[in-house]
Image (cartoon, grey):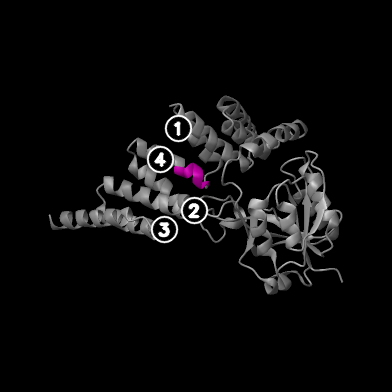
Amino acid sequence: MAPLLTAALITRDESKFLEGCLESLVGIVDEIVVVDTGSVDDTTAIATHFGARLFHYPWNGDFAAARNQSLEAASGQWILYIDADERLVNTDRAKVEQLLVGANEVAFRILFRPRPTATPYREYRLWRNDPRIRFEGVIHEKVVPAIHRVALDDDRIIANADLMLVHLGYEGDQTKKHHRNLPLLRQQLEVEPDNLFARHHLARILEALGEPNEAEDELTKVVTSSRLVSIPNPVASLSYADLIRLRSSRGEDTSGLVDEALQKFPENCVLLWIAARQAMQRSAYEEAINYLDQILATDWVTQPDDGPSYDQELVGEFPWSTKALCLFRLGRYADAAKAYAMAASFAPGNPTYRVKEELAAARARRFMIQ
């Protein structure tokens, strides 16, 4: 029989991350396939040390082509799609076998943290080794359409699984990656001008490379596109938030744009946070509390299935501490003390919340006596 699970990844100068990635796979996967696209560091030596099947594929500016080479080389019954700067966590071989042996599904959406401190959401990272399932696109390569086609053709379902990947790769200077990705994104948008994710990524890169006006033009295109449809692409919420941030940094009034964004994405925590901060700046503390309470009421059990991912501070420490400040300024000192206590529970290493909690509690006692 073929081995059960192959981890398939592509690399180029990933010695900083690769060892940790492969260590996380030891004893869990049966096979590791590494397709290297031209490393000049120790990447290939690390791959060999961990017993990976190593293949060389000269970089040709096409991520899908490189990833498909790793799929062609895989011999496992199932594919785990992983990058060198990611780690497989919170699982073991027994859980993998329980999930995959005898499974009827075509694929599983597993949990994914885009940063170690982010909340998880689900991505298509585990699927049957099937020659019909291949990547498409030179950048932000897509495999989901192929998975859905196979699911429909074979009358199989796509299910959720609680395996988790954690991504580490956003740390450090990204300039080299930005220059690599910039022409690829422009090329992809020539083919797919309505690819909002690629357009938003292009805007982020342009801003990072010191071109804020061009970045704003790309963000505006995404926002304009979302105005033309009744159910906008969730990616547009990111562009709304970035556009609001850019215009606010120039001192522009963005309250109308915030209201528009929230009408389209009323449950988006980033937009609710922006609205709360703007309300605070107007001393509209009750309004700010309303936005913050919506963030705090989010169901984090079901959130990974619906997405998106948020910085953990944004959905815990920050809304509680900001709510506490609003309550304090409204003279609701006892409630403020409770809110500061909640903020402290999310950030036990920050002593200022306990100090503020005690101050608010003292105010509450003094006014109660009066």
Amino acid at circle 4: Arg
Amino acid at circle 2: Gln
Q: Which residues are magenta?
A: 268-273
Tell me which label, 2 or 4, sits earlier in the chain: 4
- How crowded pointer 4 is (Cα within 10 Å; few <14, some 14-19, many 20+) is rated as many
What type of secondary structure mainly makes up the magenta span?
A: helix
Determine which residue is flagged by label 2. 312
Task: Tell whether label 1 touches label 4 (CB within 8 Å).
Answer: no
- How crowded pointer 2 is (Cα within 10 Å; few <14, some 14-19, many 20+) is rated as some
Q: Is residue 275 magenta?
A: no
Task: Tell whether label 2 touches label 3 (CB within 8 Å).
Answer: yes
Q: CA distance from mark 3 to mark 4?
A: 20 Å
Left or right of 3 on screen, residue 173: left
Amino acid at circle 1: Ser
Quadrant where the C terminus is found in the figure: bottom left
Determine which residue is flagged by label 3. 346
Mark identifier at residue 255: 1
Towards the viewer: 87 or 46: 46
Q: Position of residue 298 (x, y in %)?
A: 49, 55
Left or right of 307 on screen, residue 140: right
Q: CA distance from mark 3 to mark 1?
A: 30 Å
Tell me which label, 3 or 4, sits earlier in the chain: 4
Q: CA distance from mark 3 to mark 2?
A: 9 Å
* Number of the front mark, 1 or 2: 2
Determine which residue is flagged by label 4. 277
Residue at the farthest left position: 370
Q: CA distance from mark 2 to mark 4?
A: 17 Å
